[in-house]
Amino acid sequence: MTDHSIGTAAQLRDPDYMPPLAKAVPLGIQHVLAMFVSNVTPAIIVAGVAGFGFGSNSPDFPELLYLIQMSMLFAGIATLLQTVTLGPVGARLPIVQGTSFAFLPIMIPLVAGKGVDALAALFGGVLIGGLFHACLGFFIGRIRFALPPLVTGLVVTMIGLALVKVGIQYAAGGVPAIGTPEYGSLLNWSAALVVIVVTLGFKFFARGMLSVSAVLIGLLVGYIYAIFAGMLSLEVIGTSWSRAASFALPQPFKYGFEFSFAAILGFCLMAVVSAVETVGDVSGITKGGAGRRATDKEIEGATFADGLGTALAGIFGGLPNTSFSQNVGLIAMTGVMSRHVVTCGALFLILCGLVPKVGGVIRTVPIEVLGGGVIVMFGMVVAAGISILSDVDWNRRNMVIFAISLSIGLGLQLEPGALQHMPDTARILLTSGLLPAAVLAIVLNLILPEELPGEATEEVSGGMAGQAED
């Protein structure tokens, strides 16, 4: 779509401009297509790690559908908070909210193998963490100094590194299949590879909506391949569709409410990272879409909406929300700054969230097919972190901070048994890898002097360069 077919250049830069519905609705759905897969994937991963049965005859099937349903519903509600606003809550900008990957390294240890019983503590943490996140709006501008690209880039990279293992496991057959003869079979990998190849093809050789929706198209093609390859039957699809209700409202505190110190602390600490990510997205939207800096009011309103949207989701069984960066790029690409366009997309998400049959169809996607999409998405998270790190001045001081934080964080994540004698709460938080890396990077960045003493620089540069000089 060209700018001239929608409005004048001045109108396109105005968040309050409303394009004709014939243009606004397709543009809004385009925003949904860009984030849809990323939005529902965390719910599927949490359910899989918790040990929910994925088959349509499993007693946990309705719970899985509900988690997917809430992911769509509260992504839409949180997006409405940003675009329509509620008092000081919301930025009145085209910000798309969705379920955050950033919290997965915290959620996975909390629910691993514990089934539905673990969800009370999980959603208790989501609710309290969301309220804490909203409170950050009062002083978010004052803590940005403690989170330079060195810290935020490290955190985003760690999020991706913590999740790439999940993508490989899914592509090989899923966590429940580990150790079985079928795990890692050529058939399983072929489905994942079809998704990856199709995604890359549409991303780089298509234009417009086809390029934006590359991951979704890759999953659709992989889904069709799985049917023809015998990995999925039409009977299973029909059963999933028939078992899911046509309409259902969310239920407050469906899984109960439990205070877990590990969950609350983990979600509150990650809320700081999520808040800074939202600040970056708001700045990217105003710069890319309107050619200006974001105002303090917009940043504060966006942070309020981020936290309140998460807290509301926690009450009804939804996972933490955050602004979606891929939609920031979409605004820059289309040149349409209208918040009402995103409102159309939010209403579409809410509609999907109220119709469990949508979740029923999503759930029939074979885990191997989903693995192909997840590999691409999680790899992009790592790439985004490296992109942020490219802004760092890589002097010896920053290299030391990065090296120590990454080594300890990634090391604890790879070898959780090293903390087997720690209390449960500390073990859950530390073995996520993300929190120890983030805390170390923040603390070291604040306390270490800007320049290392001369005698320490040889240790940082390593022995290879010294040997070469000899």
Image (cartoon, grey):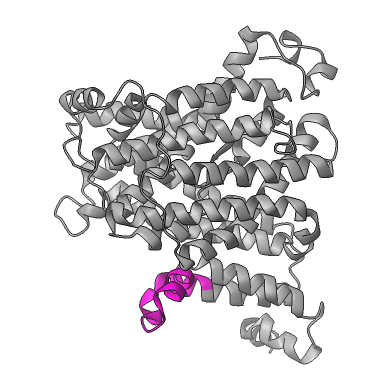
34 over 38 or under it: above or below: above
Which of the two residues, 40 or 118, is positioned nearer the viewer here? 118
Asked whether residue 205 appears in the rendered view, the answer is no
Magenta residues, as a range?
A: 409-431
In this image, 228 relative to 103: left or right? Answer: left
Q: Quadrant of residue 446?
A: bottom right
Q: What is the quadrant of the N terminus in the image?
A: top right
Q: Where is residue 202 drawn, in percent x and y?
A: 49, 28
Asked whether residue 390 appears in the rendered view, the answer is yes
335 over 277 or under it: above or below: above
Q: Quadrant of residue 297?
A: top right
- Magenta residue check for 200: no
Which of the two residues, 163 or 199, is positioned nearer the viewer here? 163
- Magenta residue check for 417: yes
Q: Identify which residue is drawn at 73% across, 36% down.
A: 91
Q: What is the quadrant of the C terminus in the image?
A: bottom right
